[in-house]
Amino acid sequence: MKKVAIVCAAGRQGTYLVNEAVSRGYDVTGFVRGEDKVANPKAKTVVKDLFDLTRVDLEGFDAVIDAFGAWTPETLPLHRTSLKHLCDILSGTKVRLLVVGGAGSLYVNPEHTVQVKDLESFPDAFKPLATNMGEALAELRARSDVQWTYLSPAGDFVADGERTGEYLLGGEEYFVNDRGESRISYADYAIAMIDEIENENNIQKRFSVIGK
């Protein structure tokens, strides 16, 4: 039985990840802040802020999923510092670190010199978020001491979308399905993330997923 820790497990994506992992029969522990609770009764709840987590807290897990998210201007830099903290405490261990990433850092040309966030059509409101998440990914790429995996969702990441059980996998470049859409639900994204824990196809890599 896989032992999986999910950090920020009470958030929307964290909740879908918990439910998906539990449905596979995993031993799931959700780390939450303050009064938050993991919604699934079959998962354990540990109340501890991400930045207070230690190496000991994450010992014995096969994988740790980082579902951290920050949205306000003053908290956006936490994407970098929170990921660095998790990398530092997992450094040199065999525990995998899987990161719920963003789509803004996906490339739109074969040379990998232009990212989605660089396009004129990319909404200005989301550029600070995409920039901070992209910087966090760049720092993650430099870590050879951590068994990391970064999963970028589709451009349209739908919180309450349907769970279809189907998805398409890509690499570093932005892509669309047969209908010309880059869209995926939180539920289908969670399936792809847990599948990656089982398949171990993208260790120390970034890959991407969209809905069929």
Image (spheres, rainbow, N blue to C red):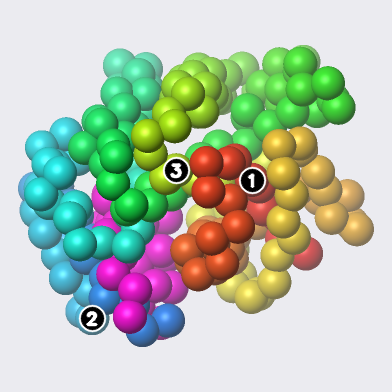
Q: Quadrant of residue 109?
A: top right
- Which residue is depicted at the point 21% across and 79% down? 41
Q: Quarter of the image containing the N terminus? A: bottom left
Q: Is residue 160 magenta?
A: no
- What is the secondary structure assignment of the residue under circle 1? strand
Pointer 1 residue? 207
Among the two numbered marks 2 and 3 on one chain, the one whose residue lies closer to the N terminus: 2
Among the two numbered marks 1 and 3 on one chain, the one whose residue lies closer to the N terminus: 3
Q: Alpha carbon of mark 1 to alpha carbon of mark 3: how far?
A: 11 Å
Q: Is residue 147 above or below residue 17?
A: above
- Which residue is depicted at the point 38% across and 47% down? 97
Q: Looking at this view, is 36 or 199 the one in front?
A: 199
**Left or right relative to 1: residue 55:** left
- x then y, percent, for residue 177: 84, 55
Q: Quarter of the image containing the C terminus? A: bottom right
Magenta stretch bounds: 1-23
Pointer 2 residue? 42
Among the two numbered marks 2 and 1 on one chain, the one whose residue lies closer to the N terminus: 2
